[in-house]
Image: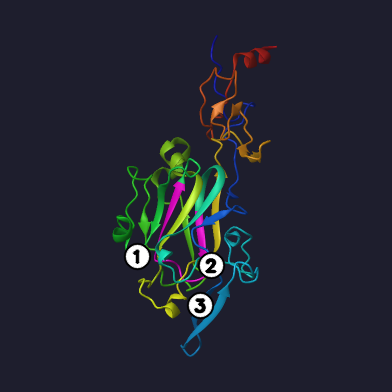
Amino acid sequence: ESTPRPRRRGDGRTPPRRSRRCVSAAFGKEVKASSECGSPPTRYCTTSTDDKGEVIRNCQICDASNAKRAHPTTYLTDLNNPNNVTCWMSEPFSQSLHNVSLTLSLGKKYELTYISLQFCNQKPDSLALYKSMDYGKTWHPFQFYSSQCRKMYGRQNRAVITKANEQEALCTDAQSNVEPITGARIAFSTLEGRPSAYDFDNSPVLQDWVTATDIKVVFNRLVGWTGNENETLGQTYFYAVSDFAVGGRCKCNGHASRCIHDRDGLLVCDCKHNTAGRDCERCKPFHFDRPWGRATAHEAHECVGKFHFSSLLL
């Protein structure tokens, strides 16, 4: 029996890769922090400069038991309203300030387009982004930011990306002289500058590179922090983030246009093309006459079975 020809764009049958819109993958999801102010209530201070150039010190209390004074991780992934900025805050003046982490679980595999962090105070000097593809069991470097890339992370600053290293994490300086002291943002584009980005469908390396189930942010160093500050000065040192955003698409290998929750509440792809699995990563039972393949813009790679073709002839 002859194998049926692949179904391509415009032949009136199965459409090719199903387009999935980019979504805010982090919105409303839980973030776990290794440090959070307010338990017990903690004094923290911010500084600003008035019109005369004099430094103004403004001190408040972070209290986790008081909703008006709390700075929980739920503020990281809630609606980001510039008219009502809410911030997660770490504990100030802590010896753990060199390794404060935020961990976000996306619930399933996503193909990420960007990761963005907006800060309530000054941006950190050094931070690292990691990703997991196995729900937090193992972690892989995704991107580094530091004024001293070699010293902090053993990497060259702004290394050139080639096809030989386009799946490697790079390091760049997070600071900029033109950015505001507060409200600055770090935005990491997962495919920017990577040579195979324009041929993504045919690049298994980049398909794997952008895939993640979990994201971890590790803050490694504050600007100006030495660890020898007195208590008064130390109260001005802490991490504060107003928005932790992740843009991406459910990883469905081109066989679904959306994700849904199954009977167990798990987020899964709404698979088409006779595919199955949380990520449409295999063929349905009895549809093995053609090997499974990732759908592309020109080829659906529909899974098929003999009984299916018999019915088409009736």
Q: Amino acid at mark 1?
A: Ser
Furthest residue in direction front, as rendered:
40
Residue behind mark 2: 37
Residue 41 image position (x, y, % from top left): 56, 71
The residue depicted at 53 percent of the width and 81 percent of the height is: 58
Depth-wise, is mark 3 or mark 1 nearer the camera? 3
Judging from the image, what secondary structure is the residue with disc 2 in?
loop
Which of these two is toward me, 131 or 88? 88
Q: Is residue 217 left or right of residue 164?
A: right
Whether residue 129 appears in magenta in the rendering, the answer is yes
Which residue appears farthest toward the top when viewing the image?
A: 1
Dot 3 falls on a residue whose secondary structure is strand
Q: Which residue is at 45% across, 80% downward?
A: 232
Residue 191 appears in view:
no
* Residue 194 is inside the magenta segment: no
Above or below 68: residue 107: above
Q: Are marks 3 and 1 in contact (CB under 8 Å)?
A: no
Marking on residue 147: 1
Q: Quadrant of the C terminus?
A: top right
Disc 1 to disc 2, how far (Cα)?
Answer: 27 Å
Compare marks 1 and 2 and give the one earlier in the sequence.
Answer: 2
The residue wearing badge 3 is: 45
Q: Which quarter of the rendered picture does the N terminus lie within?
A: top right
Label pair 1/2, CB-CB below 8 angstroms: no
Q: Nearer the viewer, residue 216 or 311?
A: 216
Quadrant of the image occupied by residue 138: top left
- Quadrant hosting residue 108: top right
**Where 150 falls versus 3 (above or below)?**
below
Please state which amino acid type lies under the numbered disc 3: Cys
